Image (cartoon, helix red, strand yellow):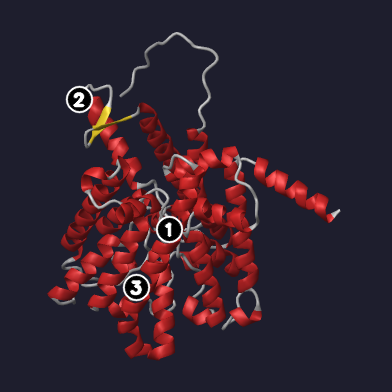
């Protein structure tokens, strides 16, 4: 009987559509995390099932939005559970599924293989498995290096044991672009510390590039030999970071609630940190609720753009925005193809980018509409919260604590969709079906 159920389960898992399998894995991990956080050893101060579910969902989707204080409500065991959920969630749906299926001894079917190859930009399942091994090495090296550097700042303040734990927790959270902090006041007291302001953004950036790009950086040492995807990601990331840092500094330089009281060196460090963090990292060294409205709008745009495909970050993705921009340029130049770095980009990539962007916009506006129905408050705070949830960023203007049960459910769904949705949509867009019937073309007037 047990053997029969096991065979049936294996057959169901192997034959099920990949998006369903991967979404189920994430949902199961959220459920296990909720159960773990509700155990008495995990709680320093008592909290309910709703708080545990929200925290587990935020950790697995590497978001960072919270309805409880990690330092105040969770014991060391509870914080370890959150860090584990962040690590597993940050590995990504594809990598996590390969690891789980391999650990269970389950074969990777043809449908799963095509999804894996499409999402990780590889040509064979063997290459995907090799990529997974590279990913694990990169993750281990980056997080250990980040822990070592952060320990230099935290150990003198929190002691050896406490400093090492805070360094490890922050390094794991930062590399996975989660935004959770194990310290009572977060990173606000560290606004002028060079070690914190340089090491954590380095982890944000590396984690947000995407595992495919990281693999190329490890294996390929020549810019000319990089793939078009890697070149677009590196260039796009650099432009977004530089622009965000400069604009943030210009907008907040004299704001008495953020950069105004700081010295010039601290202002530059804070501008650098805040310029990097909105595209899914979620940490902050200044009070986000006190930003100028113009800066808040900038942050929402950066959160929606997000990081790179197959990375630890969320959002619409940098390459999606770049392809949309290239398609727009091609349209105004009356070109039939998109070009970048001496390579052409197929039309179906533009259609995929349009679909991802359109669905993302619908999800965000639906979330804002639902929250405005059930919550009275500043509209910009509500919109900021939804953008942060969809981009799996974790930055908040203090609105998270005011969410009721319905509002929490909406944000959980948006966080889940923000992490799972783009990959699920990518599967359907990657599954091509030839048209059986062709219709006569006609013209639709636009604009």
Q: Which residue is mark 1?
A: 135
Q: How many marks?
A: 3
Mark 3 closeness class: few <14, some 14–19, many ≥20 residues within 10 Å:
some
Q: Earlier in the sequence, mark 3 or mark 2?
A: 3
Please state the horizontal and vertical placement of residue 335, each as a whole percent of the image.
24, 23
Most distant residue in the left direction: 264
Place of residue 224 in the rendered image (x, y in percent of width and height, measured from the top left): 22, 43
Say which residue appears at 35% left-offset and 41% top-offset.
320
Q: Nearer the viewer, residue 59 or 176?
A: 176
Along the line of sight, the residue nearer the viewer: 94 or 251: 94
Where does residue 44 sit, x and y in percent of width and height? 57, 83
Q: Are marks 2 and 1 in contact (CB under 8 Å)?
A: no
Under tag 3, what secondary structure? Answer: helix
Q: Secondary structure at mark 1?
A: helix
At mark 2, the secondary structure is loop
- Nearer-N-terminus badge (2/1): 1
Numbered label attached to residue 333? 2
Q: Is residue 400 left or right of residue 187?
A: right
Q: Nearer the viewer, residue 89 or 221?
A: 221
Query: Mark 1 packing: few (<14 Cα in 10 Å), some, or many (20+)?
Result: some
The earlier-in-sequence mark between 3 and 1 is 1
Q: Is residue 87 left or right of residue 393?
A: right
Mark 3 and mark 2: span between their CA atoms? 47 Å
Say whether residue 311 is visible. Answer: yes
Please say if 340 is above or below 60: above
Pointer 3: what residue? 145
């Amino acid at each position: 009987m047990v053997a029969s159920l096991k065979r049936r389960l294996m057959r169901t898992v192997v034959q099920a559509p990949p998006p369903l399998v991967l979404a189920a894995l994430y949902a199961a991990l959220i459920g296990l995390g909720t159960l773990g956080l509700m155990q008495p050893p995990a709680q320093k101060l008592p909290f309910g099932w709703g708080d545990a579910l929200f925290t587990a969902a935020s950790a697995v989707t590497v978001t960072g939005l919270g309805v409880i204080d990690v330092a105040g409500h969770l014991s060391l065991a509870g914080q370890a559970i959150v860090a584990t959920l962040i690590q597993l969630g940050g590995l990504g749906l594809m990598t996590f599924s390969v690891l789980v299926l391999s650990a269970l001894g389950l074969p990777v079917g043809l449908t799963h293989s095509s999804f894996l190859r499409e999402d990780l930009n590889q040509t064979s399942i063997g290459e995907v498995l090799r990529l997974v091994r590279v990913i694990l090495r990169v993750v281990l090296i980056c997080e250990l290096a980040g822990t070592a550097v952060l320990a230099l700042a935290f150990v003198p303040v929190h002691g050896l044991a406490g400093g090492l734990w805070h360094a490890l927790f922050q390094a794991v959270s930062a590399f996975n672009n989660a935004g959770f902090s194990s310290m009572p006041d977060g990173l606000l007291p560290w606004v002028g510390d060079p070690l914190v302001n340089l090491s954590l953004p380095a982890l944000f950036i590396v984690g947000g590039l995407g595992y495919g790009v990281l693999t190329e950086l490890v294996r390929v040492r020549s810019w000319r030999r990089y793939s078009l995807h890697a070149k677009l990601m590196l260039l796009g990331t650099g432009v977004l970071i530089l622009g965000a840092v400069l604009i943030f500094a210009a907008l907040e330089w004299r704001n008495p609630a953020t950069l105004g009281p700081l010295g010039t060196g601290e202002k530059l460090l804070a501008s650098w940190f805040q310029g990097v963090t909105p595209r899914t990292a979620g940490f902050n060294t200044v009070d986000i609720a006190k930003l100028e409205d113009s800066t808040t709008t900038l942050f929402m745009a950066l959160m929606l753009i997000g990081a790179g495909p197959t990375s630890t970050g969320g959002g619409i993705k940098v390459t999606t925005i770049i392809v949309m921009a290239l398609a727009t340029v091609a349209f105004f130049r009356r070109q039939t193809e998109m070009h970048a770095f001496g390579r052409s980009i197929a039309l179906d990539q533009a259609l995929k980018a349009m679909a991802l962007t359109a669905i993302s916009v619908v999800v965000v506006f639906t979330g804002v509409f639902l929250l405005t129905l059930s919550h009275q408050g500043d509209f910009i705070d509500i919109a900021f919260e939804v953008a942060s949830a969809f981009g799996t960023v974790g930055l908040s203007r203090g609105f998270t604590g005011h969410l009721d049960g319905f509002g929490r459910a909406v944000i959980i769904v948006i966080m889940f969709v923000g992490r799972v949705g783009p990959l699920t949509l990518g599967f359907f867009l990657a599954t091509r079906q030839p048209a059986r019937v062709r219709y006569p073309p006609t013209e639709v007037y636009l604009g």
